[in-house]
Amino acid sequence: MKTDTSTRRRRFNAGTAGAVVLGIIVLLTLLAPVLAPHDPLAQDLAHTNAAPGEHGYLLGTDQLGRDLLSRLLYGAQTPLLVGVLAVLCGGVFGTALGLLSGYARGWADQLLSRLADIQLALPAILLALLILTFGGQSTAVLVLVIALTGWPAYFRLVRSRVLALRTSAYVEASRLQGAPAHWIILRDLLPGVRGLIAVTATLDLSRAVLMEAGLSYLGLGAQAPAADWGLMVAEGQGRLLSSWWIAVLPGLCLVALVISANLLGEHLSRRKDTGGEPRRALSRISRTRTRSAA
Amino acid sequence: MLRFVLRRLGLTLVAVWGALSAVFLVLHSSGNPAVMMAPVGASEEQIAALGRALGYDRPLAEQYVTFFGDALRGQFPDSLTFQQPALTVVTDRLPATLTLAATALVLACVVAAAVGLWSGAGVLRGRRPGAAREWPMGLVFLAQSVPGFFIGVLLVWIFGVRLQWLPTSGASGAGALVLPAITLACGVVPPLARVFRNSLTGELARPYTRTGLALGMRRGRVLRHAAHGSMLPTVTVLGLEAGALLGGTVIVENVFSWPGVGQLVITALQNEDYPLVLADLTFLITAFVVVNLVVDLLYGVLDPRVRHSNGGH
């Protein structure tokens, strides 16, 4: 295929750039305890709001004199941890239900599909606010809330792919040989949706990170004094006039993280020949809507 | 048509039921909801009295039924900070939110149209879509990857703090509307521009474009016809985004201290005014579901194919 060779010849493309940036961010976050020049929570009240480069602070300090560079290095821990866990929970849950729904069909399929419709009809951020307010604010609840608003994407994509796969010759052959249902689902159908899941998960990661950041900005995610990019933007917003770096630098880090996940996801979705389905399904989720059954 | 309306209505009722059940479930997951509904520092007896007054001591099944009735009639416990019925406080703030959302929607339409037409004009000049000339689409991708609150903070920094052109908080005068509306629009433009551009380039690939050009029709005129043809999918997404804007207002209003429903819920949260939070969120979630219903029905009116399909996947 012509397009395949041309992408292979172009060694460096947007997808690679996304993967590299994402890798660097993950690596820096993991190495934060080694790399950070200061304790991210240690206050230096003599040198608050120091500009980048002043008093030996490479990227300056915040309103409590905490080293911004150290806080930035630690600041991706919550978004990445919450994001990855939420993607895992939502992905496993949605994929499992999608496999069952597509394989079993019948009333179970009807029920699960309507459940996904209802989930999509509820606005994600408002639902998250509600659950975090009345259900308690903790990292576990945060993960569950983000996973809860993410599973329908996996469910729908996997289900529709399984509906197409279950009538294919190799699944038919398996069935005729008397393979049990769990064998067909795990050995025949699951490998067929693996690529689809990988693409969806990458794009879902950027959604999860954006949601964590938004909730932390509103004060319902990571709590002070923790270093968290979304929370840091909120803390620095009132000091834009005198010390812009406190809010702007963590925001830029967040943008780099989300863009790299988006670039990688978009690139994968083109390479893996998924026809752009995951992107459409996810944009549907991140904006939460009901356009489905029509 | 009737069948279509009934189907949609049914799905909406189920969604409203799901939403309210979620609210109820979450409210009672903490144990005694009266603890949250009482003012800070209330004594045990006061909490118990409030719990009895609000019916929290009844069996759960009975509470579930009364909760539905109350929610549908808009009856919530009084707001602790405003000393008024919570829903009245919410509806008082509604005009500000609607003004912001409507302005953002109009702005998003203009920008998305410009981005789509730019790409379409490029295609008409024989450029391959997806090339570097489509830089506005690149900007759209960028906007999609920037958190809404950070777009807001950047705008405040540049236009409010540095250049001092525009106010950055409150709702005094038309100038105060500019930055929040731009921020809110940034969330809507990407899906809108994408669908418009894609259906426009799809229309331009159809034979009537070539016929028009071969007959000597001006490019602008051909583009206009193609744009007309790509209206339907664009209008669908536009309508759906109208619902999504409601969710976006929570974050944007907080960035700019815009005195709307979205800011109210976070202020209430900070003041531990949980009755108000409950009323506000229930109102917004129900409004969101209803807006989506109206949009779906409108889409059925616009496109006969929708109302004649029997649904299903």
Image: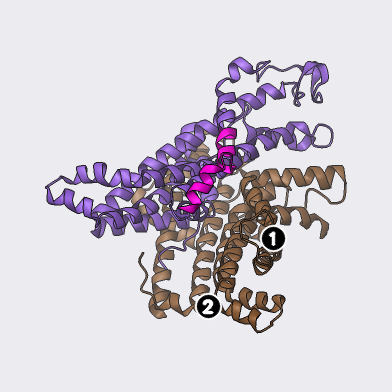
Say what secondary structure mark 2 lies in: helix
Residue kind at label 1, given as amino acid type: Ala
Residue at 41 percent of width and 75 percent of height:
B4
Q: Which residues are magenta?
A: A1-22
Residue A98 shown left or right of residue B155 in the figure: left
**Residue A172 percent across, percent down from the top left:** 19, 54
Q: Is A172 placed above or below A42 here?
A: below
Q: Which mark is residue B104?
A: 1
Using the image, name the chain to which the residue with label 1 belongs: B
Using the image, name the chain to which the residue with label 2 belongs: B
Which shade is chain B?
brown
In this rendered view, identify the residue nearer to me: B163 or B224.
B224
Q: Quadrant of the C terminus of chain B?
A: bottom left
Residue at 60 percent of width and 34 percent of height:
A21
Q: Quadrant of the N terminus of chain B?
A: bottom left
Residue kind at label 2, given as amino acid type: Leu
**Nearer the camera: disc 2 or disc 1:** 2
Q: Is residue B159 magenta?
A: no
Residue hosting label 2 = B302
Residue B99 shown left or right of residue B46 in the figure: right
